[in-house]
Amino acid sequence: MTRNPLEQAEKLLLVRSETLMVKPVQFGESTWMYESNRKPVLMNEKSLTIIRKSCLHHLSTYDGRREASKLVLGIRSKVPIVIDHIEGIYLFPIASHLKPDCVWISLFHVKELKIIDKKRTEVLFKDGQKVIVNVSIHVAFSQLALANELQKRTKTITFNGAIEKVERKKWVKGKKRMIISFSDWTESEQEKDLKR
């Protein structure tokens, strides 16, 4: 069965489970969409517009998702969001969502973060793609940890009214290895949860 080209173009305009990163270019007027095992595609759409459409596709609004994440995490800025908790699509921003150059990264696909210099970090994805983003490894690690916490809390939400504020993770200075690997991180986090 041949797919409709218009339908395929529509799917590219959405954040999906295959999406690695949404990276704005040209002062935020266009966006590079990185997908697993594919070359990046330049979209003539703003990053935040793509994310908003993706939330609507999953029957919610971006503002609603953002407010829910703020409530669950007890934070106010650089809030990660859930596009679809069933498919496991969690995105974290590396800057304020209001900035036109804000890059959004998918939690599920990150394998490693590596220091390039004080203000740049290389993101290695599970499929082997590497992308350099203009943010310190401290911020990248903190944002990834917040998205991971959001994922954990999304799975265990109870509505007793008590929201525990999450502490932002800190990068430990003085490490000889300048790479943070996440391939085993979720497994060790799950082991800790089982012990609780």
Image (cartoon, grey):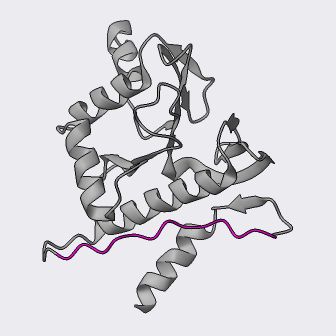
Quadrant assignment, res 9: top left
Query: Where is residue 167 shown, x and y percent of the image?
Result: 45, 70
- Name the residue rendered at 42%, 65% in the picture: 149
Residue 180 vs residue 139, the one in the foreground: 139
- Name the residue rendered at 40%, 70% in the picture: 166
Q: Looking at this rendering, what residue extends furthest in the right direction? A: 176
Query: Where is residue 195 shown, x and y percent of the image?
Result: 44, 91
Residue 6 vs residue 143, the one in the foreground: 143
Residue 87 sits above or below residue 45 on the image: below
Relative to 27, is 39 on the left or the right?
right
Bounds of the magenta segment: 162-174
Q: Is residue 80 visible?
A: yes
- Name the residue rendered at 14%, 74% in the picture: 161
Quarter of the image with the C terminus in it: bottom left
Query: Where is residue 76 shown, x and y percent of the image?
Result: 34, 53
Q: For the stretch drawn in magenta, what is the main secondary structure?
A: loop
Quadrant assignment, res 194: bottom left
Residue 37 sits above or below residue 66 on the image: above
Q: Is residue 1 visible?
A: no
Relative to 78, is 119 on the left or the right?
right
Residue 165 forms part of the magenta stretch: yes
- Name the residue rendered at 71%, 44% in the picture: 121
Quarter of the image with the N terminus in it: top left
Residue 136 forms part of the magenta stretch: no
Query: Where is residue 182 shown, x and y percent of the image?
Result: 63, 62
